[in-house]
Amino acid sequence: MMNPFIPLAFLLSGSFLTYAMGRAEHLYKKKYFAAATALLFFLIALVLQVYFAMQVWGSGPIEFFISDTALRMDALSIFLALIAISLGSVVCLYSVKYMEHDKGQEYYYALLLLMVAGIVGIGLATDFLVLYLFFELMSIPSYALVVFRRHEWMAIEAGMKYIVMGAVGSALAFFGISLVYFQTGTLQFSDLVTLLHGSPLLQAALLFLIIGFGVKAAIVPLHTWLPDAHSAAPSGISAMLSGIVIGAGFFTMLKSLLIFTGTGFAVGELLIILALLTMSVGNLMAYSQLSHKQADLKRILAYSSVAQMGYIVLGVGVGLAYGIRIGFEGGLFHIMTHAFMKGLAFLCAGVLIHQLGTRYIDEMQGVGLSMKVTGFAFALSLLALAGVPPLSGFMSEWMVFSASILTYGFIGVWGIAIAVIALLNALLSLGYYLPIIKTLYLPAERKGISKATEPSPIMLIAIVILVALTIILGVYPELGLQAVKPAVDILAGGL
């Protein structure tokens, strides 16, 4: 059997070769060397990851060593890796034409590969140190990609805010890890499960881990970097940040919290409270953006990502607190569906901004009538995010809402309150998604809108792939649940 490290190795080595090919572009005065190399390595890594997924789903987890470091490929790591590499491949394809006029593409594609490699490594980690190192491997390229267009002041400002908050979060998480080591003398997850207890020092460690990793997960009140970063980053990177980076941040936090679930700490209950706060603040902030004279499309989508993280955290929190399996399934399935539908929304937004030269919604009126494919895809992504059936967002959100209702059997009327708040948030999201769709299809008032054309076929292919995934995962959710259910088995049984 091949070494399970190979997909990650392809991503890491691909980043260096991509950089070299990008430098060759300048030497031979040819385009697309870096983009083609990165896309090739993404596709190879995806094929290899699918191969190992079949092995793991059929025969169980695979443990392996790199030097003296133990790594483990199981259903949970497979789940995260498949989403990250799939979305990364689509974004790489989209960027071939979207980024063709930007300088420094050898850095862009190399950093994109490294960021995805970090996400894949997070799933493989079996101890806190390796988990933290891969978390940083994901984070550092994301900082650089947010400020990729550093000639724009908005990118510099957003990047500085992101770096400062991210660095502080990483430092707090590392301090939490050091407290765990000081108390137990080990960082191995398998050992910590039996060694942890409810001491005040470990309570402090738990708090530092939640805050530290919660920054990257954009959980309220640690979310303030996200709207600026998503607005300033290239749209492909916005798709990655919203689609999988914040999900991987929560995934990192979840792997950390799982070892505390048997110690008497109310981890699940705390996540439920944070989830309700996160979805409410995210939706209210997104809704309030529409009242601005010049409502920034990408900023609204960014606040929407905060709200969507609330649904994810709520599902997992209900699962941890009350052992409700459909909560785990809904939370993980929403990580998958959100990756593709929010990725689709940002790619479409990038096309609209690129073609029209504006990021303000009012100035896009009527563009759906002239750019029919992009307009339809964007409207579909917003409907999916709002949970409209039969699209993928409806299926995952419905599972989360169902789990919330089931908490009535454990906490009575408080369970109904949780479900009501979640449902009201879903309705609130329609309050800002529908006006955007309406604006797309009103008669054009701005000159040039009626003459707007569709983007390059390559960009359209990337968009159509995500449209297909958004529809298929709604009509046939079992396709996605085949990856979700084995991962839930691990969560339900403990790390």
Image (cartoon, rainbow, N blue to C red):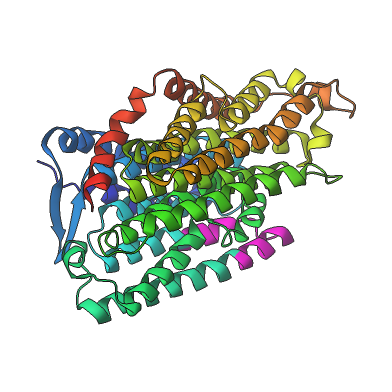
Q: Quadrant of the N terminus?
A: top left
Q: Nearer the viewer, residue 420 or 189?
A: 420
Q: Is residue 128 visible?
A: yes
Q: Is residue 107 left or right of residue 445?
A: left
Residue plotted at (67% across, 59% down):
155
Q: How many marks?
A: 0
Q: Residue furthest front?
A: 412
Q: Is residue 96 left or right of residue 360?
A: left
Q: Position of residue 111 (x, y in %)?
A: 46, 55
Residue plotted at (30% across, 44% down):
323
Q: Is residue 336 left or right of residue 281?
A: left
Q: Is residue 487 highlighted in magenta?
A: no
Q: Position of residue 190 (x, y in %)?
A: 17, 61
Q: Nearer the viewer, residue 412 or 223?
A: 412
In the depicted structure, whether residue 488 falls above or below residue 265: above
Q: Is residue 31 visible?
A: no
Q: Position of residue 53 (x, y in %)?
A: 23, 36
Q: Is residue 149 highlighted in magenta?
A: yes
Segment colored magenta: 140-161
Q: Position of residue 322 (x, y in %)?
A: 34, 46
Magenta stretch prevailing secondary structure:
helix
The part of the image, by quadrant, that contains residue 363 is top right
Residue plotted at (52% across, 43% down):
418
The part of the image, by quadrant, that contains residue 430 is top right
